[in-house]
Every structure is written in C-alpha cells, then in structure tokens.
C-alpha cells in the first residue's frame, strides 16, 4: 500500500515563476522521485485530473489561476554515470538547477555545456524546448532521459532520436506535451573537448582579449558576462528571456524584406531558409522601452518583455499581441511566442 500523496492547496506561484505574475495553484504536488509521479497517477482523484508540470517557471507566463494539478518537479542528484573513450556521461535529476549543473561539470573537469551557462530553470525543462545559446543546443550534448507517463505511470527512457529535437522544440511540445514528467536527464560531454566560439558575441570577446584559444572556464565566464550585460536578472526584473522565437522565412521572403528594409538582421541557414532576428523586427516597429500597463519591452533588448512591477498576465498578453500585430503589419511575419502561455 503506497503512502497518500501530499497535496498543497491554493499555493501562490508568483515566487515560482520568473515573470513574477501572481496566480494560484489550486492543488500542488511536489515530485521528488519517479515514484511520486506514479502515486499521483494511481490516486483515485488526482489520477483523473488534468496536470500542469512546473520546473523553475522561467519559461511560463501565467495569466490565470491553475485548476490543473501542478506537479512541481524537484528531483535532485547529479553523478558521473560512465567515462567513455569519446565522452563523459553525466546524469542529473530534473529538479536540479541548470546553471549549477553547468558550473559543477566544469569544476569536475567535464566541459561541453559552458556556452549554456546562466540559462535559468531546471535540468528537466532543458529538453522540452531544446535550450540553446551562443552556438550550442542541448540536443548536441544529449544522451537520454527518463520520464514517467502521466496516463499509465510507466517509466520510459527516451533517446535523442525519440526526443525529436529541433530549434526550441522537441516531442515534449507536441505528441508528449503535458503527458510525461521528465525525471532524469543524461548528457554526453564529448572528449576531447572542442571550443565553440563561432557566435558573434564570443568572436568579439576573442578580439577584445586577444585570447584566440580560450579554455572552457574562460568561455563560461565570457558567456556569463555577456548575458549579465544584456539580459535582465529575473530575481530583480520579472521576465522569461526571449519572448518570441526568431522567425524562419524563405529566401524570397527575406529578399522582399531586404528590398524594403536593407538593414534587417538575418542569418542564412544550412537548409536554404533564412532566420530573422525577432528583436530587430520589434525594434524596427518602435517597441524598445515601450509599455502597456505594467508590462514593458526591455530597454536593452527588444526580444525581452518585462514585468515593470505588479504586471498582470493580461497586460503581458496584450503587449505581446500588440507587438505581434505591428510586426505582422510591417513585415508580414507572425511572431511565435517562445514561452508557454497558460
Ligand atoms: C533571463 C532568461 C534568459 C533565458 N535565456 C534562454 C536561452 O538563452 N536559451 C533558451 O533556450 N532559453 C532561455 N530562457 C528560457 C528558459 O530558461 C528555458 O526554457 C528553461 O529550460 C526553462 O526551465 P524551467 O525549469 O524554468 O521550466 P518551466 O518554465 O517551469 O517550464 C517550461 C515548460 O517545460 C515543461 N516542463 C518543465 N519541467 C518539466 C519536466 N520535468 N518534465 C516535463 N515537462 C517539464 C513545463 O510544463 C513547461 O511547458 C531564458 C529565460 C530567462 C528568464
């Protein structure tokens, strides 16, 4: 006989989300292990109720109270699983802090995820949107993960191919959206280590410092410094990082935009399509530093929407829609939000 599940009632999620929007979780269950998920699934009341999985809340925008049972993932632990000739395999609990994992792997002498330093949130959410920054994506360092199916309570292991990673995308945003709780993630940190410094901001650091062969610790410090200068700290100013994905368009569409706006920031992709800088499009529409109510566009980075203090979810959504409309009106491009809007 399993012990009953502990359910917390009417928990204010303001402190559990990076945007700092007030919303109540009617029922919240803390998940410390895969067995906690199975107990929720087996519970006669909770098992049948809709669920919402919450990690560190850095990529969710809450616009209302949550009636679904909130599963707050707090699975801890990190360890070296295996040393192979070509890689270190490292495992971490889904509730571990991502940035602390990056720092820990470096301290242990297993580099490879230093470009992903300072991305807020938990290890378990990293595969959901295939986090990426400064030329590296999680998918490139991913080995496998364990998850528990919320219908059956069955534990499954997913390989990289099964996760269907893409740009800020994975199977957890499609077929498995809200259906599986990720409990553990394994990373493959390649040996020998190779620096990834082709990203413009890192090339600039090389030029500034004259250090053309930075080690992993130096790249980590550069990435932290660049991010601190550019992005607001959610502990001080509520935000979820980039609010919109960079849109990908055809060469013809890009040519058309360049015809009208020669300065549009764009990056050709290997498949022949072109990625446009969403921040540039928003800037071009005059949104930098503007606000609607208490929700605003960050002064230093137009892709970041911020809570100027006490903003409501409705104000954030109104601002996001107004930006989408003006970008569509001027460029004919529909910006897609990156965070999950609930
Ligand atoms: C200042 C700032 C900068 C950022 N910079 C970047 C960046 O450079 N690159 C980048 O990719 N992202 C960035 N982000 C977005 C965010 O950090 C990532 O999306 C992060 O992975 C979210 O982690 P989380 O634990 O907070 O997830 P949450 O916000 O709690 O959840 C996000 C989604 O994942 C689901 N989820 C969470 N945990 C689990 C789990 N264990 N099992 C199944 N589903 C789960 C949730 O249901 C939700 O759909 C940034 C955010 C901020 C605030």
Image (spheres, rainbow, N blue to C red):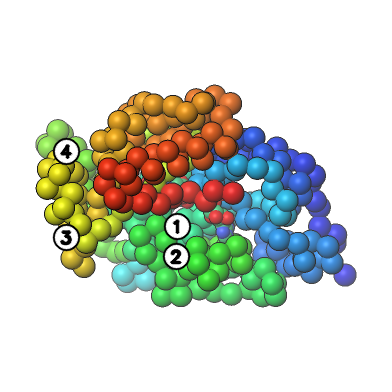
Distance from mark 1 CB to nearest ligand 1 atom below 8 Å: yes
Per the model, the C-alpha gap separating discs 2 and 1 is: 6 Å
Question: Pointer 3: what residue?
Answer: 252
Q: Secondary structure at mark 3?
A: helix
Q: Residues within 10 Å of mark 2 (few under 14, many from 20)?
A: many
Q: Position of residue 144 (x, y in %)?
A: 47, 69
Disc nearer the start of the sequence (4/2) = 2
Kindly report which numbered mark, 3 or 2, lies closer to the viewer in this rendering. Answer: 3
Question: Pointer 2: what residue?
Answer: 170
Residue at 88% x, 70% y is 1
Question: Pointer 4: what residue?
Answer: 204
In the figure, residue 163 lies in which quadrant? bottom left
Kindly report which numbered mark, 4 or 1, lies closer to the viewer in this rendering. Answer: 1
Disc nearer the start of the sequence (4/1) = 1
In the figure, residue 2 lies in which quadrant? bottom right
Per the model, the C-alpha gap separating discs 4 and 2 is: 31 Å
Kindly report which numbered mark, 3 or 4, lies closer to the viewer in this rendering. Answer: 3
- Disc 2 to disc 1: CB gap under 8 Å: yes
Kindly report which numbered mark, 4 or 2, lies closer to the viewer in this rendering. Answer: 2
Per the model, the C-alpha gap separating discs 1 and 3 is: 28 Å
In the figure, residue 205 lies in which quadrant? top left
Residue at 31% x, 51% y is 333
Question: Pointer 1: what residue?
Answer: 129
Q: Position of residue 277 (x, y in %)?
A: 26, 46
Looking at the picture, tell me which residue is in the foreground, 309 or 323.
323
Q: Residue furthest front?
A: 329
């Amino acid at each position: 006989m399993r012990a009953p599940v502990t359910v917390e009632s009417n928990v204010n999620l303001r402190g559990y989300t990076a945007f700092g929007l007030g919303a109540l979780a009617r029922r919240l269950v803390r998940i410390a292990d895969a067995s906690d998920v199975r107990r929720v699934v087996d519970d006669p009341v909770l098992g049948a109720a809709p669920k919402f999985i919450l990690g560190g809340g850095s990529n969710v925008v809450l616009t209302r109270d949550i009636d679904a049972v909130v599963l707050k993932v707090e699975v801890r632990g990190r360890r070296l699983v295996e040393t192979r000739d070509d890689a270190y395999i490292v495992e971490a609990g889904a509730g571990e802090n991502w940035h602390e994992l990056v720092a820990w792997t470096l301290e242990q002498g297993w580099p490879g995820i230093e470009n992903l330093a300072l991305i807020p949130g938990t290890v378990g959410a990293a595969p959901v949107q295939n986090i990426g920054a400064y030329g590296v994506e999680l998918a490139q360092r991913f080995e496998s993960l364990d998850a528990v199916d919320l219908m059956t309570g069955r534990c499954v292991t997913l390989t990289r191919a099964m996760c269907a990673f893409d740009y800020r995308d994975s199977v957890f945003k499609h077929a498995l959206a809200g259906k599986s709780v990720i409990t553990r993630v394994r990373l493959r940190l390649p040996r020998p280590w190779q620096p990834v410094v082709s990203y413009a901001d890192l090339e600039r650091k090389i030029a500034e410092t004259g250090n053309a062969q930075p080690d992993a610790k130096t790249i980590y410090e550069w990435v932290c410094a660049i991010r601190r200068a550019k992005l607001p700290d959610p502990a001080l100013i509520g935000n979820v990082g980039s609010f919109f994905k960079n849109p990908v368009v055809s060469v013809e569409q890009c040519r058309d935009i360049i015809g009208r706006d020669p300065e549009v920031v764009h990056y050709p992709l290997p498949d022949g399509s072109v990625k446009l800088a969403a921040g540039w499009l928003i800037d071009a529409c005059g949104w930098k530093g503007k606000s609607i109510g208490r929700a605003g566009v960050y002064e230093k980075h137009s892709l970041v929407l911020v809570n100027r203090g006490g903003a409501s979810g409705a104000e954030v959504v109104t601002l996001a829609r107004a930006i989408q409309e003006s970008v569509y009106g001027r460029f004919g491009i529909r910006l897609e939000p990156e965070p999950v809007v609930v």
